[in-house]
Image (cartoon, grey):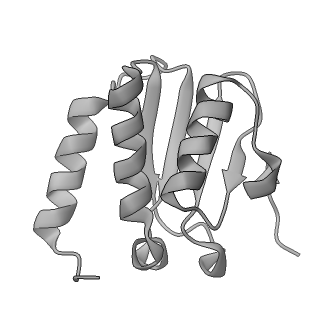
Amino acid sequence: MPRLKVEDLAKIKEKTRKMTNLREGAGRVKITVHMGTCGIASGAREIMNTLLEEMEKQNTEDVLITTSGCAGFCSREPMATVELKGEAPVMYADLTSDKIREIFTSHVLGGTAVPAYVLGKGSERAG
């Protein structure tokens, strides 16, 4: 995998900005892709790109996609957290493009979490 450059991050940011509505409270669902160094090294960029493709394919306008740094579970990267309005956030781990597509269809569009990939729900605490 080639090294990620500042220009690559700028392109990802611009693509995300174009494809999401970033107004506060405008989304029905918020998806956070954890893109700390460990996440990027494990494939978070592929997860982000897959989500953006799915949003475009499904013509989804009420889903916000954001990024964050490391969530503290480096060995479980790549990870993403899905938050439906009015429900506890669900953190998914060990993601692949196929898994995030399934999560997008079942959880984001259908409202049903995918237990096989869930690391935690609500306010996770290690230990």
Res. 37 visible in picture: yes
Q: Quadrant of the C terminus?
A: bottom right
Q: Which residue extends farthest front?
A: 98
**Residue at (17%, 64%) from the top-left corner?**
8
Question: Horizontal and vertical percent for residue 118?
Answer: 76, 54
Q: Is residue 58 left or right of residue 127?
A: left
Q: Is residue 15 left or right of residue 119?
A: left
Question: Horizontal and vertical percent for residue 54?
Answer: 41, 36
Answer above or below: position of 51 versus 30: below
Viewer-closest of 93 and 121: 93
**Residue at (77%, 36%) from the top-left corner?**
88
Res. 118 visible in picture: no
Q: Quadrant of the N terminus?
A: bottom left
Question: Horizontal and vertical percent for residue 104?
Answer: 56, 37
Q: Which residue extends farthest left?
A: 7
Total marks shown come to: 0
Q: Is residue 20 left or right of residue 126?
A: left
Residue 116 is drawn in which quadrant? bottom right
**Residue at (63%, 42%) from the top-left corner?**
103
**Residue at (23%, 76%) from the top-left corner?**
4
Q: Is residue 90 left or right of residue 60?
A: right
Question: Horizontal and vertical percent for residue 111?
Answer: 71, 25
Answer above or below: position of 6 versus 97: below
